[in-house]
Image (cartoon, grey):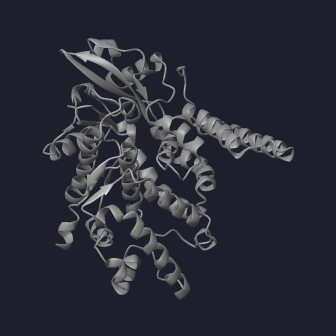
């Protein structure tokens, strides 16, 4: 893959790149409608061309723009397939930064070149994602993974989110007011994700707290080889999900890995009340012996106690049939708003009742088969239906607490991983302790 010698860092240059991409997308639509007139245009071709052009632009910009594309790629069945497939490259195979820029980052951060810090250091990146890329190093007989952040990324987050807002709004059919509300939360998490000192601290804490979960492996982190923009840890073995599935693991191994992932997230959410909120395939290393290596604790979401208690009360069996309690919880969580009309309260209560019943299905059984294609098609169909709903589209304000954004995405990401694994999992959750 071709390396980048520079990344646009100024607001003007990054805005210009987005505008050029917009022009290309406009040209793709013009080509599509021209072909359609003579019966040759296809939506699949349009989606493929747009996905290629948008990803090409975002991958060169790196940072929050590419991170949003990575997040969108986790929504299988919601985005057109061409977008999900292309954007998934942002998880671990984006175009890497050239070695001279890596050396510059080392000199700026550690006042030494990589070769002066480590006994050996690979000039070519082993993996490259949205915020940084990983190189392999050797030190004191150990193999290390060294994550190097792209220059200028932390300073461009706010402006990037403003620029990408129209693209996300169009793709997900989200109103401007609702998008503004949630972009504040996304921006806050992304700023934290660029602080590698914070990631090192959180990585050690969560690894220590979860060390009792059998089958999980965490790297050791090295503060002496780390800084705000460089993070060094043990090199873990294993394969990312797509490569792992090519090894044709048997069902027992799939189920074992699925159970480890479920238990890992269940413990974080319900005991630690903070979670590794970026469960995409690039952050897990899977092994044929049924164990899992966990990397990249950059995106951590912590839950306020009052939000946690109210939100998970919604998972109490039978709660949606108790109209009074269910409606009160929806108001407390701002899924229903105090100035809603009676018609709006009725409409959105029924909508959230349907969504709640479907998305919480795994929690209402002792065991759940995530290979069930019909279940996921039902989720996709519901999402598609409400994305086109006129009442939802014209909603006067965002609904739901900002704290629920990354929690919902975490569960969607986990569900997606388990679905691709085809895992059958014991889903009796620690959340049940609230109700027992």
Q: Position of residue 150 (x, y in %)?
A: 45, 30
Q: Where is residue 209 in the image (x, y as percent from the top left)?
A: 16, 47
Measured as percent of width and height from the top left, residue 235 is found at 26, 25
Q: In this view, does 400 lie above or below 91?
A: below
Taking the spot 57% from the left edge, 44% from the top edge, the residue there is 81
Mark yes or no: residue 249 visible.
yes
Position of the C terminus by quadrant: bottom left
Compared to residue 378, the image places residue 40 above or below, namely above
Question: How many marks on residues?
Answer: 0
Tell me: 385 left or right of 228: right
**Viewer-proximal residue, 12 or 241?**
241
Residue at image point 70% right, 46% down:
43
Q: Can residue 9 be seen in this view?
A: no
In the displayed structure, does residue 284 sit left or right of residue 384? left
* Camera-nearest residue between 144 and 389: 389
Of all residues, the one furthest to the right in this rendering is: 38
Measured as percent of width and height from the top left, residue 105 is found at 41, 24
> Could you tell me which residue is drawn at 35 percent across and 38 percent down?
283
Q: Is residue 84 left or right of residue 200?
A: right
Q: Which residue lies furthest to the left in this view?
A: 212
State whether residue 292 is above or below residue 325: above
């Amino acid at each position: 893959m071709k390396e980048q010698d520079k990344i646009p860092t100024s607001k003007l240059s990054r805005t210009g790149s987005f505008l050029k991409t917009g022009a290309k997308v406009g040209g793709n639509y013009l080509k599509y409608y021209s072909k359609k007139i003579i019966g040759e245009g296809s939506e699949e071709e349009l989606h493929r061309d747009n996905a290629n052009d948008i990803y090409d632009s975002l991958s060169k910009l790196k940072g929050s723009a590419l991170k949003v594309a990575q997040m969108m790629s986790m929504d299988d069945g919601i985005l057109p397939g061409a977008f999900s497939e292309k954007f998934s490259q942002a998880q671990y195979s984006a175009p890497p930064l050239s070695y001279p820029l890596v050396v510059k980052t080392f000199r700026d951060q550690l006042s030494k070149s990589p070769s002066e810090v480590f006994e050996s250091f690979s000039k070519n990146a082993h993996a490259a994602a949205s915020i940084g890329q990983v190189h392999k190093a050797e030190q004191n007989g150990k193999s290390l993974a060294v994550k190097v952040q792209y220059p200028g990324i932390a300073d461009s987050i706010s402006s990037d989110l403003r620029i990408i807002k129209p693209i996300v709004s169009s793709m997900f059919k989200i109103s401007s007011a609702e998008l503004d509300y949630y972009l504040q939360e996304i921006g806050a998490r992304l700023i934290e994700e660029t602080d590698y000192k914070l990631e090192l601290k959180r990585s050690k804490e969560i690894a220590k707290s979860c060390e009792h979960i059998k089958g999980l492996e965490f790297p050791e982190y090295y503060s002496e080889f780390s800084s705000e923009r460089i993070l060094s840890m043990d090199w873990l073995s294993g394969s990312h999900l797509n490569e792992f599935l090519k090894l044709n693991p048997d069902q027992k191994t799939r189920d074992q890995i699925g159970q480890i992932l479920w238990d890992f997230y269940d413990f974080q959410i319900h005991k630690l009340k903070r979670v590794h909120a970026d469960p995409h395939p690039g952050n897990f290393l899977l092994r044929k012996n049924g164990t899992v290596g966990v990397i990249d604790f950059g995106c951590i979401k912590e839950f306020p106690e009052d939000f946690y208690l109210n939100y998970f009360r919604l998972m109490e069996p039978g709660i949606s049939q108790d109209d009074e309690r269910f409606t009160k919880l929806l108001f407390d969580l701002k899924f229903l708003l105090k100035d809603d009309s009676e018609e709006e309260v009725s409409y959105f209560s029924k909508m959230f009742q349907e969504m709640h019943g479907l998305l919480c299905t795994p929690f209402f059984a002792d065991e759940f088969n995530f290979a069930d294609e019909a279940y996921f098609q039902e989720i996709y169909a519901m999402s598609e239906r409400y994305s086109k709903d006129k009442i939802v589209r014209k909603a006067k304000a965002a609904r739901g607490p900002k704290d629920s954004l990354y929690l919902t995405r975490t569960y969607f990401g986990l569900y997606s991983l388990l679905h691709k694994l085809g895992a059958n999992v014991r889903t009796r959750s620690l959340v049940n302790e609230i109700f027992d």
